[in-house]
């Protein structure tokens, strides 16, 4: 049986604490690093201490994806262990290190927000705009984690690509013990959320919800006795938890269509999310925009809506 230990680290995000994992294989592997907070750094060190491990003992790090609550303390660990091996999906390196991509991503989102119909005043207020994102330099990434790959020193584990939450998200599965480390792909009783990523330059815009549903269906087939998420409790009933997530997605699709009907069958993305979320909208406008933009992409693929661009802004029209 593989020994896997979980440490809970604080974040400043609504999702609550994040888990990092230590896998005791031929190599001592840390899965994810936590958000860069002094308390998280202390808890990581203390947590390792209770396991009789020090940061210096770690052989390697695997990142499930590039989000700050997962990769945020990477540079701090590298200060202790400058030559530690870091294994990631091939896109992670670009998101974390490529300054050109970071700039392009900022421009891409400015344009997408405009196309979605968000007022300029709102767009300008987003602190999230990635063009100012700090990149991490000086790390050599082994960007080999694609579907079916194995991580050196983690015998018995295989990589499962789980896109949708981000475009570089991977999970780890151990068939022999039926253990599944699913990162942010599936979180029990909580919607993991679609976070749009800019496509790599020259590549088509990803359809994140479609990828997400496909990868949920794929994971549903995995025999898993125990699934560890990066947030929330571990669980034993993977197919049931996935079915709940799929039902929530269906519900969101139905609500989007209803909102369009209320708008007389057509509207901009902004009008749709205003109709759907009303007063709640301003609390998490970017998250709602990401969710519903990806729902509208799916509806377009299914020929339920047609999209036209009027003065640079998408108009979504319901097909009766
Ligand atoms: Zn997370």
Image (spheres, helix red, strand yellow):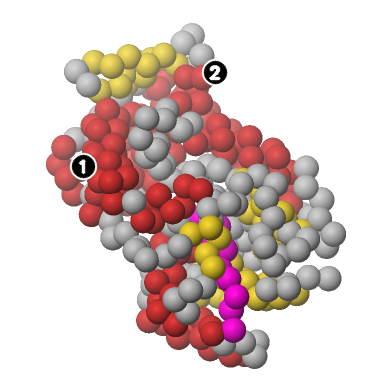
**Residue at 50% in and 70% down:** 33
How far is the residue under mark 1 from the one under mark 2? 29 Å
Residue 274 occupies quadrant: top left
Instruction: Residue at the far left: name it.
Output: 121
Q: Are marks 1 and 2 in contact (CB under 8 Å)?
A: no
Task: In the rendered view, tell whether residue 211 sits above or below residue 158.
Answer: above
Residue 195 occupies quadrant: top left
In screen coordinates, is 174 left or right of 46? right
Membership of 267 in magenta stretch: no
Task: In the rendered view, tell whether residue 6 sits above or below residue 255.
Answer: below
Q: Position of residue 188 (x, y in %)?
A: 63, 56
> In the image, which disc is placed on residue 302?
2
In screen coordinates, is 80 left or right of 218? left
Q: Which quadrant would the N terminus be assigned to in this image?
A: bottom right
**Residue at 59% in and 79% down:** 58
Task: In the rendered view, tell whether residue 209 sits above or below residue 283.
Answer: above
Say few, some or many: other residues with alpha carbon within 10 Å of mark 1 (under 14 / 14 to 19 / 20 or more): some
In screen coordinates, is 102 left or right of 204? left
> In the image, which disc is placed on residue 123?
1
Membership of 59 in magenta stretch: yes
Question: For this rendering, which residue is in front, 132 or 246?
Answer: 132
Question: For this rendering, which residue is in front, 101 or 252?
Answer: 101
The span shown in magenta is 57-65
The kind of secondary structure element at disc 2 is loop
Q: Mark 1 near ligand 1 (CB under 8 Å)?
A: no
> In the image, which disc is placed on residue 209?
none
The kind of secondary structure element at disc 1 is helix
Number of numbered discs on residues: 2
In screen coordinates, is 37 left or right of 144? left
Residue 57 occupies quadrant: bottom right
């Amino acid at each position: 049986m593989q020994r896997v230990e979980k440490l809970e680290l604080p974040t400043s995000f609504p999702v609550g604490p994040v888990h990092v994992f230590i896998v005791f294989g031929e190599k001592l592997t840390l899965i994810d690093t936590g958000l860069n907070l002094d308390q998280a750094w202390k808890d990581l060190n203390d947590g390792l201490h209770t396991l009789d491990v020090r940061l210096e003992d770690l052989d390697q790090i695997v990142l499930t994806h590039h989000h700050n609550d997962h990769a945020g303390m990477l540079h701090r660990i590298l200060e202790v262990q400058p030559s530690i091996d870091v294994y990631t999906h091939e896109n992670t390196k670009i998101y974390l290190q490529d300054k050109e991509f970071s700039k392009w991503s900022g421009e891409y989102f400015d344009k997408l927000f405009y196309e979605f119909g968000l007022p300029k005043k709102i767009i300008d207020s987003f602190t999230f705009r990635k063009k100012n994102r700090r990149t991490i330099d000086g790390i050599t990434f082994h960007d080999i984690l694609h579907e079916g790959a194995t991580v050196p020193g983690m015998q018995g584990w295989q990589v499962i690509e789980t896109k949708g939450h981000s475009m570089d998200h991977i999970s780890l599965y151990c068939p022999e013990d039926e253990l599944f480390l699913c990162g942010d792909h599936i979180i029990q009783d909580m919607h993991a959320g679609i976070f749009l990523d800019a496509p790599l330059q020259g590549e088509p815009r990803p359809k994140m919800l479609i990828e997400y549903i496909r990868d949920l269906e794929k994971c549903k087939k995995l025999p898993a006795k125990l699934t560890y998420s990066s947030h929330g409790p571990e669980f034993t009933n993977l197919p049931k938890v996935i079915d709940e997530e799929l039902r929530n997605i269906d519900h969101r699709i139905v609500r989007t269509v209803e909102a369009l009907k209320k708008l007389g069958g057509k509207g901009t993305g902004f009008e749709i999310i205003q109709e759907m979320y009303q007063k709640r909208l301003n609390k998490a406008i970017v998250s709602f925009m990401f969710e519903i933009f990806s729902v509208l992409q799916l509806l377009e693929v299914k020929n339920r809506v047609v999209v036209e661009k009027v003065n640079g802004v998408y108009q979504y029209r319901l097909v009766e």
